[in-house]
Image: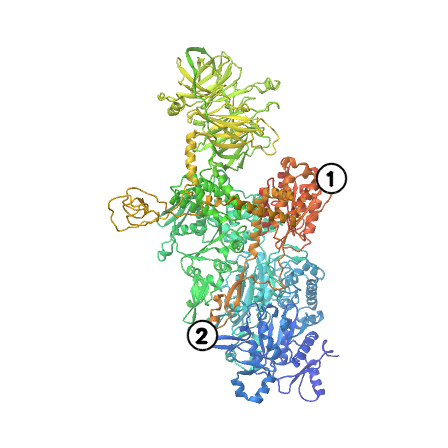
């Protein structure tokens, strides 16, 4: 009854020979005596007759040969019943000679059972932790070189077999396949063939042979005996549910298995109570209860929220850690301890954790904060203990403080390499330090936090407090378990040796080993440290063993060895103060669908969770972060800092996943950097700074829009000065030893020792690159390292080289690639004379000296490789492969000089990387390490910068050609940004084209650009898009010089004399009345700026039409008048102006511009009667008002002066200038007479037809002048002759009115018209040049050369005429010559306006409207009087989509500055620039031929230039070869080449050139076209036959096939674009990896020493690594397209084509997603007024052919026609979200394609917005493809930012879908 509980059922006996009853008495006495242990574990000394029995299983104990190899202090007193039953089973297996396999959940229990077994039985141990890097050499024998000879050293399995030890194989599931099978024969038969020629033989067989042949014979046969005591204990996890490889069946059959589950609740509680007597049992019971509950939850089926952890979590592993903390500090908060043991927040199971806590009442304690740590030195081997003193956070004094002892180095506190100089105390970090101190009392721990959250600073502060030395260990994905523990090297004599890693050195010295990057390390590699972390024991590769201090002492006592003897046997002590601190980043928590986590980065698996307690380092609270920043940067602007923090914490707390991804870029570390820059440069624009920090330029459109909205919400807006004036010019200057770029000045490096390494590159300065360098210099001056990100070919390398050249800084260059490793970044190993030597990489060479390291292509290397850069940039330490340590220069004194590489204080790093995201999809260097650099986005140069640069590369290339290239490539880059094309054409390609044209100016631009675009020759859809873009900008790629389509010329009737005008000497007087002018304003007009799709029409062929674009007019707008003026800042820049009515607007843009501004003039005009449409004229001013425009409204006689540059509007009015509006309101529309506005040269006349008065307006001065003239006759028309003369036409008589700048004169001279041309329609203000006048009149006598001598005349009945004899004066006469119409304009043509005169070309251009044909057409007729010809050009009507206000079709013409071009604008806003002048056309045609290039159709020949050495004699024709054979050299034959004297080519001294036709021919297009017609016909027939056969296979009619192809043709380009995007996304995941340990392939640099020793598996090769079995499966993305097929789609299709767009959109998606089922699951459902869910396409049965796709489209169209009215958008969306969330997918997308007809069915946008964000696991987007008015635009603004799109053109749909699919791939 007095036996302890657990001992009544099963007794353990360690019996001696003698009386059994006596032994029982002794045993009972031991039980009843507390001071006597049942097992003498402190010093096991067995005698020959000693036995061990458990539950009747009895084995004999034998003294170990090497007692120091027997495990110590693992057997608990008393053991639990469960442990005893396991040990009983193991004794049974041992007695049977069977090997054991202990299988169970992660944790130390299985391993400790094996060690218990060895300790109880006194067996020596061989232990190996298996990993994916374990090879057969680690198990059998390893080659080593000693004394120049290769020797074999036995490894663990061989040593165990020969010495009779227990071999523990820990982590069976981690070893790669085909590694463990080498043990099969050893396990089964106890036999193994060794590499050194020996053969291990089973003991029975060996003993039998020994008796037969003797020892010498067996030794000669090289046979060795396996010990009969040899046993194998394998430890493994069950796979599945845990990750790993399943057991190979042959291997499995050789083991006996036993499952090892966690101990029962009561046994664990008894053990805890027994071991931690100071902790109240109630506390221990509560902690154990919570652990049991969490373990039970994690073991539930997969529908549990904890099922994402790949197996149950062993929550019991940290119970003793929690109890140890409570024993040291009873005031510790239990919830914090439990959360560190089970980091629920980090693994996404916080709700389950909180639920478990709520089920048990845990004692609550106030949170404690670290106040001080006081040292107290004790005399324990000259080491010290420390006392940590903690106080409650709410206490203002240390009253109520608690203290507990912690391990540390009191004599080194605050004087260590981990000193916390940069640490700024905050309550949150102090609380974390408290938790770290508590965990430190129990052992090791791990910090998990985002980038820049302060993990390293906390560790350094922690080490400084406790006096620890920090041993930083940078972890990376390719690191092996061997490299983590030991590194293989060679001695100076070539012998191989092992060097301890920093981790082992830290264990021996008592330092803190900081494992930086535990999230990067492969799971099996980190698991190799389990025994070190949990048991403080580890076995190394060379056989060395490290054990904890207590076990080390016990081993010495048991073996009687001294420390020196232990060291000789490679057994060393682990310092008791040694600690391991892990540092990692949290795993990315993405959506969890169907209970299965879709994240691919869940590194916190159950086995790793059992290794450490975890502390989550979150970002600082806002006020604490503000305190830290102000402490480090006291001079920063408080306002800007508040805005910065407000934005940062908004991003961190948002539920928008896209914005959350940007929060990582604004870590505390980055915020300090931004604040430092703002403090140094107070005028810095915060908007621009944050745009660079977050690389806004390269964000996906959705994320960019969301980020800009977030900036606006916190008041961070772009600089008003920048928006208004643009960037200021940047210049640089080198003066003395100073460099100034822009406003930044720094000293130039004066050290010329490495002058050869200073880059000197050809660089042409441009503003954009200078702005980038100015920004770089700002950060460089602050001591920052730089990161330049941009597309390829934008000049990143050139910018950096130029930057360093200006600073005279030498550089080291390092280019990364996909095969870059951490080793190649630092040291490159090689073999010299049999010794491995290490060559320093550019990185190491640069950091040692005052150099700049330029790392190029950083995105090509895996991010886990470039992680070493983080330590270097942050001033941390890391160890090189040769054992040297890289340390800051300030710490170099702490180490021997030969062991360190000090980092030079001036060392800088500049990293170059391509932009992240589509289409590059490289490794996102910016996302991994962007916050440790000062980031700069390098974009392609802007237009001006690129033009300036190209002019320097190609000074001989015409500027117009350069502008075509810049504009075309600029649009191609925009298309790449939008995802329409996959390749982002860069400045590098443009420069290459310009260089070619500079060197070979005879080659046409259309041919040279093939050098860039021939890459796309085999992608017809892409090439078609590229070619159309180039043609649009006037680059004639693919054009032929014969593609000239000028309008045909027709002969004009000759000019005949038509009478004359005579100016009388007398006239009449008019009454002049000055009018006071009242100018109101200025007022700012509402202005919008729109991009225009400008097309240069001469890309494919040459015609009069030069360019075309559409004005973005409102659907009710129509054009009233056009004009052309000059820019006030540059008189060579011509501005085009178009005034429109309904509403009245002024559109203005430069002639070569790509954007148009629209000024709304409606508010400045009075209201007119609804029947009186506005009648508008405009006039472009010159002189003092240059750049301004007069706009006259005829119905109200309103005059506006508009300054389009400043957007200012002035209203000009006077007492008599305008007619009162009130007087017009009562008039009938038919009786209203509009005012006529006739524009002259900076003057105008306003009158009404039939009125005896006019108003003259002069604008020669800043203040306009106005004069009213009262006439004695009624006016019918007014014609301007010049700036000083006007012709006033009356009903019968005309008069000449003279004017000055002060106004008209009162006297009018009568003009007698002795001619039938009395009603003049138009009269040019300028005269014809004399030579054109001579040609026009067909006279050889040159007319008098006098300015303005002649005028072009147009009048009814004639096609054109000329009047000579100007200027008019009293008594002068004018001769008229005209050509009769004779029906030239055509009976079906209606001339819509008087002709426009081009006097410098002698042309009149008539606009006309052709109504007689099948369709209406507009056109112009060009009458060329000097050449006596005319041409007719038809122009199609460009109807505005959705035009609701039809007006009469017409053209508006205006001559341009060059005198031969016209601005032609139709009534719908179609703008054309036409060249009609003969001379200008001739010049442009020559330039076009130059662009196209000539000579490709001509044969080529090869010629050689050489010196024949022969003198010429007499020139002669030479002999004629009857065979016409080619002759080279000589002087005999005619037609030879390269000879002398004779007629030929390429020679010298001949009389003349003679081509005998000897040339090199190549296949031409004509030869291709010469294929016989019957062959072409046969080929077509074969194609048709195959096509019909395919149709029969899919049961598709020819009609349906044609219909489908027509539909597909409309979206074929978009389909190709979308396919390219999807394929690019897929290709990223299919990259091959290096597979190591191969017997062939590329030599693995990491295995050079193995190669020296003769091992075979020293190669690596590329291959697709098979995923680990049990690892997380990669699931496809689920895209559910929800299409609106309601009645409104059919009803309004005629209005805006919404149904057609919807069907085309679905077709595009179906075609593009075809053959991508592995990556994307596509479902297409519809909804209408009848049904909520209409299935069209199911991912379970994807469509396979065109017929099925066409049937789907037909079904959708039928639903829209026959469904009832109504809408179920909300219900259908809710159902789609619910259905999408049920599947197992990587990501879920629901894309709602609908019209914007929400208001009709009372659907609230607010409710729909809530629905779209209701499920965080489903990304919901809406695409509105139909809209009445601005419905869609308003609805988009009401929905969540970035979640809604308006798509009224299907060409935008691929871009939208790309944005949707890439929105979460940041």
Q: Position of residue 588 (x, y in %)?
A: 60, 56
Taking the image as drawn, is residue 1777 in sight? yes
Given residues 773 and 1422, the one toward you in this image is 1422
The answer to whether marks 2 and 1 mark residues whose Cβ atoms lie closer than 8 Å is no
Residue position marked by numbered label 1 in the rendering: 1764
Q: Position of residue 1519 (x, y in %)?
A: 30, 46
**Which quadrant of the view contains residue 368?**
bottom right
Q: Position of residue 1594 (x, y in %)?
A: 65, 49
Which residue is most to the right? 1
Residue position marked by numbered label 2 in the rendering: 495
Given residues 929 and 1337, the one toward you in this image is 1337
Quick check: 5 left or right of 1425? Answer: right
Quick check: 759 left or right of 1666? Answer: left
Please, what secondary structure does the residue beneath circle 1 have?
Answer: loop
Q: Position of residue 339 (x, y in %)?
A: 64, 61
In this rendering, the label closer to the viewer, 2 or 1? 1
Quick check: 284 left or right of 1513? Answer: right
Given residues 1258 and 921, the one toward you in this image is 921
Q: CA distance from mark 2 to mark 1?
A: 89 Å
Q: Specify few, some or many for label 1: CA neighbours under 10 Å numbering under 14, 14-19, or 20 or more.
A: some
Taking the image as drawn, is residue 1206 in sight? no
* Image position of 152 with respect to 1614: above or below: below
Q: Specify few, some or many for label 2: CA neighbours under 10 Å numbering under 14, 14-19, or 20 or more.
A: some
Q: Quadrant of the N terminus?
A: bottom right
The numbered disc on residue 1740 is: none
Please, what secondary structure does the residue beneath circle 2 have?
Answer: loop
């Amino acid at each position: 009854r007095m036996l302890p509980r657990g001992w009544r059922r099963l007794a353990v006996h360690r019996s001696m020979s003698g009386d059994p009853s006596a032994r029982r008495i002794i045993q009972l006495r031991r039980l009843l005596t507390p001071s006597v242990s049942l097992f003498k574990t402190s010093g096991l000394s067995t005698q020959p007759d000693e036995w061990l029995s458990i539950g009747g299983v009895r084995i004999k104990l034998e003294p170990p040969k090497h007692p120091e190899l027997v495990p110590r202090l693992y057997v608990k007193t008393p053991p639990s019943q469960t442990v005893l039953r396991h040990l009983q089973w193991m004794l049974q297996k041992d007695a049977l000679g069977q090997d054991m396999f202990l299988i169970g959940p992660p944790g130390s229990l299985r391993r400790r059972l094996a060690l218990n077994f060895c300790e109880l039985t006194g067996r020596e141990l061989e232990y190996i932790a298996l990993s994916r890097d374990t090879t057969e050499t680690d198990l059998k024998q390893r080659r080593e070189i000693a004394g120049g000879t290769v020797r074999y050293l036995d490894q663990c399995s061989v040593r165990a077999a020969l010495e009779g030890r227990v071999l523990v194989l820990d982590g069976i599931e981690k070893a790669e396949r085909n590694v463990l099978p080498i043990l099969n024969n050893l396990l089964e038969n106890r036999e193994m063939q060794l590499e050194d020629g020996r053969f291990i033989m089973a003991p029975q067989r060996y003993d039998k042979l020994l008796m037969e042949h003797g020892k010498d014979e067996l030794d000669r046969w090289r046979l060795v005996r396996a010990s009969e005591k040899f046993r194998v204990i394998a430890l493994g996890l069950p796979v599945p549910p845990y990750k790993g490889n399943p057991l190979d069946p042959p291997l499995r059959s050789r083991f006996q298995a036993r499952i090892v589950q966690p101990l029962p609740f009561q046994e664990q509680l008894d053990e805890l109570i027994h071991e931690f007597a100071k902790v109240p049992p109630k506390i221990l019971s509560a902690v154990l209860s919570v652990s049991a509950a969490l373990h039970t939850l994690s073991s539930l089926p997969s529908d549990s929220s904890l099922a994402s952890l790949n197996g149950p979590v062993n929550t019991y592993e940290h119970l003793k850690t929690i109890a140890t903390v409570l024993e040291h500090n009873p005031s510790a908060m239990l919830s914090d301890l439990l959360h560190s043991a089970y980091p629920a927040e980090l693994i996404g199971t916080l709700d389950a954790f909180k639920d478990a806590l709520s089920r048990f009442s845990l004692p609550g304690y106030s949170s404690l904060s670290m106040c001080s740590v006081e040292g107290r030195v004790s005399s324990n081997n000259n080491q010290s203990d420390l006392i940590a003193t903690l106080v409650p956070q709410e206490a203002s004094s240390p009253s109520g403080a608690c203290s507990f002892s912690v391990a540390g180095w009191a004599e080194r506190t605050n004087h260590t390499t981990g000193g916390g100089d940069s640490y700024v105390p905050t309550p949150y970090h102090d609380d974390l330090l408290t938790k770290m101190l508590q965990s430190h009392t129990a052992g090791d721990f791990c910090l998990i936090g985002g980038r820049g959250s302060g993990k390293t600073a906390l560790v350094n502060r922690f080490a400084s407090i406790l006096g620890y030395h920090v041993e930083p260990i940078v972890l990376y994905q390719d690191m092996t378990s061997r490299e983590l523990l030991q590194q293989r090297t060679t001695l100076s004599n070539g012998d191989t040796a092992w060097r301890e890693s920093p981790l082992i050195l830290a264990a021996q010295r008592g330092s803190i080993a900081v494992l930086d990057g535990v999230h990067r390390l492969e799971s099996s590699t980190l698991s190799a440290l389990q025994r070190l972390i949990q048991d403080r024991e580890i076995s190394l590769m060379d056989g060395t063993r490290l054990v904890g201090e207590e076990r080390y002492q016990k081993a010495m006592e048991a073996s009687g060895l001294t420390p020196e003897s232990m060291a000789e046997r490679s057994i060393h002590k682990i310092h008791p103060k040694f600690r391991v601190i892990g540092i990692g980043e949290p795993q990315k928590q993405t959506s969890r669908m169907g209970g299965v986590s879709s994240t691919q980065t869940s590194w916190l698996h159950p086995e790793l969770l059992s290794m450490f307690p975890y502390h989550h380092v979150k970002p600082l609270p806002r006020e604490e972060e503000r305190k830290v920043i102000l402490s480090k940067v006291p001079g920063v602007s408080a306002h800007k800092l508040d805005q910065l923090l407000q934005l940062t914490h908004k991003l961190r707390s948002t539920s928008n996943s896209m914005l959350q991804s940007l929060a990582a870029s604004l870590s505390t570390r980055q915020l300090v950097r931004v604040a430092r820059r703002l403090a140094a440069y107070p005028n810095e624009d915060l908007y621009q700074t944050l745009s660079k920090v977050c690389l806004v330029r390269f964000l996906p459109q959705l994320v960019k829009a969301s980020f800009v909205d977030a900036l606006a919400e916190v008041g961070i807006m772009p600089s008003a000065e920048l928006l208004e004036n643009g960037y200021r010019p940047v210049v640089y200057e080198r003066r003395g030893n100073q460099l100034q770029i822009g406003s930044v000045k720094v000293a130039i490096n004066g050290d010329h020792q490495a002058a050869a390494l200073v880059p000197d590159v050809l660089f042409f300065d441009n503003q954009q690159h200078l702005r980038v360098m100015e920004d770089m210099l700002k950060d460089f001056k602050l001591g920052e390292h730089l990161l330049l990100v941009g597309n390829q070919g934008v000049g990143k390398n050139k910018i950096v080289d130029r930057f360093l050249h200006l600073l005279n800084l030498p550089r080291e260059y390092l280019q990364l690639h996909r095969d870059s490793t951490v080793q190649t970044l630092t040291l490159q190993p090689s073999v010299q004379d049999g010794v491995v030597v290490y060559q320093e990489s550019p990185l190491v060479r640069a950091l040692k000296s005052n150099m700049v390291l330029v790392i190029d292509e950083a995105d090509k290397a895996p991010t886990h490789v470039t992680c070493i850069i983080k330590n270097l940039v942050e001033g941390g330490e890391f160890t090189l492969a040769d054992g040297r340590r890289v340390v800051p220069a300030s710490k170099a004194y702490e180490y021997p000089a030969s062991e360190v590489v000090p980092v030079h204080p001036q060392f800088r790093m500049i990293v170059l990387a391509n932009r992240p995201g589509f289409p590059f999809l490289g490794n996102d260097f910016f996302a991994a390490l962007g916050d440790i650099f000062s980031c700069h986005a390098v974009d392609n140069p802007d237009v001006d910068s690129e033009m300036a640069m190209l002019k320097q590369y190609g000074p001989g290339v015409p500027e117009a050609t350069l502008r075509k290239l810049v504009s075309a490539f600029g649009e191609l880059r925009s298309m790449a940004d939008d995802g329409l094309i996959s390749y982002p054409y860069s400045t590098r390609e443009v420069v290459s084209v310009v260089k070619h044209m500079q060197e070979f100016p005879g080659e046409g631009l259309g041919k040279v650009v093939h050098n860039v675009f021939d890459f796309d020759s085999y992608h017809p859809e892409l090439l078609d898009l590229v070619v159309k873009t180039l043609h649009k900008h006037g680059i004639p790629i693919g054009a032929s010089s014969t593609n000239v389509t000028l309008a045909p010329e027709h002969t004009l009737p000759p000019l005949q004399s038509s009478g004359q005008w005579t100016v009388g000497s007398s006239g009449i007087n008019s009454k002049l009345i000055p009018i006071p002018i009242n100018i109101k304003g200025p007022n700012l007009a509402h202005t919008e700026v729109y991009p225009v799709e400008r097309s240069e029409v001469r890309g494919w062929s040459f015609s009069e039409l030069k360019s075309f674009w559409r004005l973005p007019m409102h659907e009710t707008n129509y054009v009233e008048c056009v004009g052309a003026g000059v820019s006030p800042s540059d008189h060579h820049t011509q501005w085009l102006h178009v005034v429109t009515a309904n509403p009245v607007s002024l559109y203005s843009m430069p002639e070569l511009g790509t954007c148009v501004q629209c000024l709304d003039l409606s508010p400045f005009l009075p209201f007119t009667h609804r029947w009186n449409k506005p009648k508008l004229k405009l006039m472009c001013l010159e002189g003092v008002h240059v750049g301004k425009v007069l706009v006259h409204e005829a119905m109200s006689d309103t005059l506006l002066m508009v300054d389009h540059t400043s957007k200012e509007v002035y209203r000009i009015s006077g007492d008599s200038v305008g007619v009162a509006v009130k007087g017009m309101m009562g008039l009938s529309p038919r009786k209203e007479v509009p005012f006529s506005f006739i524009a002259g040269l900076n003057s105008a006349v306003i009158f009404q037809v039939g009125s005896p008065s006019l108003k003259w307006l002069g604008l020669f001065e800043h203040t306009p002048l106005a004069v009213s003239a009262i006439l004695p006759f009624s006016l019918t028309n007014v014609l301007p002759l010049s700036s000083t003369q006007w012709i006033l036409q009356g009903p019968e008589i005309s008069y000449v009115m003279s004017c000055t700048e002060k106004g008209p004169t009162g006297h009018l001279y009568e003009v007698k018209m002795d001619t039938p041309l009395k009603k003049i329609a138009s009269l040019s203000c300028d005269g014809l040049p004399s030579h054109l006048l001579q040609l026009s009149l067909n006279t050889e006598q040159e007319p008098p050369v006098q300015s303005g001598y002649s005028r072009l005349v147009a009048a009814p009945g004639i096609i054109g005429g000329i009047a000579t004899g100007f200027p008019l004066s009293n008594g002068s006469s004018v001769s008229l010559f005209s050509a009769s119409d004779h029906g030239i304009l055509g009976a079906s043509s209606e001339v819509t306006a008087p002709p426009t005169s081009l006097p410098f070309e002698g042309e009149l251009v008539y606009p006309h409207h052709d109504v007689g044909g099948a369709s209406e057409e507009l056109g112009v007729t060009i009458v060329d009087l000097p050449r006596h010809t005319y041409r007719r050009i038809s122009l199609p009507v460009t109807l505005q989509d959705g035009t609701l206000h039809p007006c009469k079709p017409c053209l508006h013409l205006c001559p341009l500055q060059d005198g031969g071009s016209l601005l032609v604008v139709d009534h719908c806003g179609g703008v054309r620039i036409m060249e009609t002048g003969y001379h200008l056309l001739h010049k442009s045609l020559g330039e076009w031929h130059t662009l196209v290039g000539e000579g490709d159709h001509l044969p080529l020949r090869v010629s050689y230039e050489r010196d024949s050495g022969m003198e010429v004699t007499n020139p002669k024709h030479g002999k004629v070869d009857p065979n016409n054979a080619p002759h080279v050299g000589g002087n005999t034959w005619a037609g030879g080449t390269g000879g002398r004297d004779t007629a030929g080519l390429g020679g010298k001294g001949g009389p003349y050139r003679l081509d005998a036709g000897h040339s090199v021919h190549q296949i031409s297009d004509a030869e291709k076209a010469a294929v016989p017609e019957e062959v072409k016909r046969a080929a077509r027939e074969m194609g048709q036959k195959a096509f019909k056969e395919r149709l029969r296979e899919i049961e598709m009619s020819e009609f349906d096939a044609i219909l489908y192809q027509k539909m597909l043709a409309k979206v074929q380009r978009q389909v190709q674009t979308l396919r390219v995007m999807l394929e690019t996304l897929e290709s990223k995941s299919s990259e091959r990896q290096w597979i190591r340990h191969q017997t062939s392939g590329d030599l693995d640099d990491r295995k050079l020493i193995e190669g020296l020793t003769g091992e075979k598996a020293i190669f690596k090769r590329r291959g697709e690594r098979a995923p680990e079995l049990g690892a997380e499966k990669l699931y496809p993305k689920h895209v559910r397209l929800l299409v609106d097929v309601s009645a409104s789609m059919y009803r309004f299709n005629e209005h805006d084509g919404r149904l057609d767009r919807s069907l085309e959109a679905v077709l595009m998606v179906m075609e593009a997603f075809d053959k991508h089922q592995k990556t994307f699951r596509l479902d297409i459902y519809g909804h209408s007024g009848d049904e909520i869910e209409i299935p069209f396409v199911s991912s379970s049965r994807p469509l396979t052919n065109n017929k099925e796709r066409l049937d789907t489209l037909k079904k959708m169209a039928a639903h829209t026609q026959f469904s009832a009215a109504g809408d179920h958008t909300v219900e259908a969306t809710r159902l789609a979200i619910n259905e999408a969330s049920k599947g197992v997918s990587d990501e879920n997308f629901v894309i709602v394609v609908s019209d914007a007809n929400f208001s009709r069915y009372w659907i609230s946008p607010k409710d729909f917005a809530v629905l779209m964000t209701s499920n965080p696991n489903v990304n919901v987007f809406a695409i509105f493809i139909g809209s009445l008015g601005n419905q869609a635009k308003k609805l988009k603004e009401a929905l969540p930012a970035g979640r809604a799109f308006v798509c009224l053109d299907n060409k935008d749909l691929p871009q939208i879908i790309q944005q949707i699919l890439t929105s979460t791939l940041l």
